[in-house]
Image: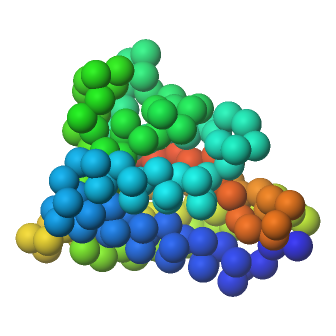
Amino acid sequence: MISSDDIAAALKIWGDQKIAISKAFEEGGIEAAREAARAHLETNYAYNLGPVLFKPTLASGDQTFRPTMDGALAYFCGHSDEYPLDAGFAIRGWRAMESVTSAEFIEGDIAMWMGWVSLTDRDGNVTKVDKSFGYRKDDNGHLRIVLHHSSLPYQP
């Protein structure tokens, strides 16, 4: 069974690792960032179980959706010939992450979370996104992201 505390812990880990990817990039360059991002993806996402339904915040056109780990890695780190529009969302100097829950749904080993995620960069600028995560508990009892949908808030 998944609990609300499990989801809160998964969100914190997700944010902490986005910060770690940014710091790895600043301290060691793109290869260090890719190593940190790959570890993040392997630890938190369910690419080892099959496709992940991943719609990044700043992706468009034919490359809007990223069901493969390579696509997610390109989105997080940029510097990819295969995904030339990716600037590297996870290497933007993130220093803090806050999540605000709108709602969650839990049923057995499946959970859904929806809310806002705000990431603060090293200059104090905040990027707030609408976010939905779907989680599944793997055979080892770890939450894995099977759905990650992100978009900028609607501006009327």
**Left or right: residue 127 compared with residue 132:** left
Q: Quadrant of the N terminus?
A: bottom right
Residue found 24% across the figure and 35% down from its top:
79
Location of residue 92 in the rendering, given as x and y in whole percent from the top left corner: 21, 56
- Is residue 130 rendered to the left or right of residue 136? left
Q: Position of residue 12 (x, y in %)?
A: 50, 76
Q: Which residue extends farthest bottom?
A: 5
- Name the spot of residue 111 as percent of width and height, x first: 76, 62
* Residue 118 vertical placement versus 96 (above, below): above
Taking depth in this image into account, of 130 and 30 the one nearest to the observer is: 30
Quarter holding the C terminus?
Answer: top left
Side of 57 where 43 appears, left or right: right
- Residue 69 pos. (x, y %): 54, 38
Q: Residue at x 53, y 52 (%)?
A: 41
Residue 86 appears in which quarter of the rendering? top left
Residue 28 as seen in the image, left or right of residue 43: left
